[in-house]
Image (cartoon, rainbow, N blue to C red):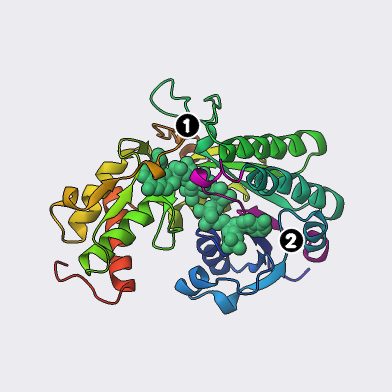
Amino acid sequence: MANMAKTALITGILGQDGPYLAKLLLSKGYKVYGMVRRYSNPNFENLEYLDLTNKIDYMEGDMTDESSLYNVIRVLRPTEVYNLAAQSFVGGSWEMAKLTTEVNSLGVVFLLNGIKLFSPRTKFYQASTSEMFGLSNTNGYQDEKTPFHPRSPYAISKVHAYWTTINFRESFGLFTTNGILFNHESPIRGIQFVTRKISDGVAKIKLGLEKKLYLGNLETMRDWGFAGDYVEAMYLMLQQEKPDDYVVGTGENHTVKEFVKLAFRYGGIPDWEKYVVIDPRFKRPAEVYELKAKADKVTKALGWKPKVSFDELVKTMVEADLKRYGRVSKSR
Ligand code: NAP
Ligand code: GDD
């Protein structure tokens, strides 16, 4: 048979990870389909940022609508499905617990049923998360053996999806994988997440568009990497002979405060404390205090390693937001 292009369906194509993954798969010769839910005005800004809008085909589907997912799988029967769609904001998940559960847990049941019924050879990637570990921090890090102690409706919904993914593998022999990814960021990170909120805030303060930056808990620690590196791990997981689950992170963590300090420094503002206001509205009912990956398995088995350092990540994000607001800081 002629060399047929592999096809990939990416749910959550309009988010942060979707465009980076699409870019990677296109570079490998895939035909890429993005699933978009129905909107009057879908936002293609992130795809636009990477110049991808016209390089992808789109299918309509909603994670809360079983028949739309069945339809997408039945029509495309893709080589690979990357399920990135989610209500992914932890902070909002207490107020939207039902929606979060429907999208993040039930949606995965629907998608996997669709694959089982209409395309059982399709390989499936589930966007699992370090949030599932929550309070579990026995050895000062988290790896594939660390038990889960989820702390939010978001994290709970993702634990459900994690086990659903494994259950379809064990029950029906489907090729399903979980990537347990630690926080990863980029210039197209959603504006509500703390890193982008900070880089955006620094740029606005530098350019005189805002006076203050309002934040919650500055002491929590995250293992932050670059989204462009992490999508390579997703891809590698689906190229293996056998499906498995992998922790993906840098192995280094920092406090929110460290991110703030560095971002202000890269924005050319030395005295960050003058601008940052602690606002209880941004504190969470139950916090995840410290995440740090031990990602030996993915390095050993798949040869994956992060390339972008914490410093480079902060710098890139601040510079991108300074540019967005129309002027590059003189301090560069
Ligand atoms: P994101 O920017 O929030 O993107 C999520 C996407 O899901 C959005 O494009 C959104 O569509 C889509 N979506 C939401 N509800 C939907 C529904 N009912 N039907 C169809 N699509 C829906 O998330 P991300 O940062 O790219 O993360 C990708 C995935 O990895 C998520 O599942 C997230 O939970 C998981 N994850 C992320 C990280 C991280 O640090 N970024 C770490 C671990 C795991 P709209 O654009 O239409 O709103
Ligand atoms: N969003 C936000 N806004 N977070 C703040 C703020 C603020 O103003 N101030 C402090 N934080 C703290 C949060 O309390 C949390 O401890 C940390 O900053 C990171 O928050 P987020 O950037 O919102 O990310 P997250 O760690 O809760 O969740 C992200 O990473 C997970 C992987 O661990 C999301 O992308 C999840 O979808 C993902 O699964």
The quadrant where ligand 1 appears is: bottom right
Give x and y (percent) for residue 220: 35, 36
Report if residue 83 lies within the magenta region: yes
Mark 2 within 8 Å of ligand 1, using the beta carbon: no
Provide the secondary structure element on which disc 1 rests.
loop
- Residue furthest to the bottom in view is 54
- Position of 264 with respect to 109 (left or right) is left
Give the extent of the magenta segment: 73-96
In the image, residue 110 above or below residue 323: above
State the mark number for residue 286.
Answer: 1
Give x and y (percent) for residue 317: 33, 60
Give the quadrant of the C terminus: bottom left
- Position of 143 with respect to 123 (left or right) is left
* In this view, the mark in front (2 or 1): 1
Count the marks: 2
Report if residue 77 lies within the magenta region: yes
Give the quadrant of the N terminus: bottom right
Q: Amino acid at mark 1?
A: Ala
Q: Which residue is mark 2?
A: 78
Please report contact status of discs 2 and 1: CB closer than 8 Å, yes or no: no
Q: Nearer the viewer, residue 108 or 94?
A: 94
Instruction: Say which residue appears at 25% left-offset and 56% top-offset.
Output: 212
Quarter holding residue 132: top right
- Position of 208 with respect to 39 (left or right) is left
- Residue furthest to the right in view is 117
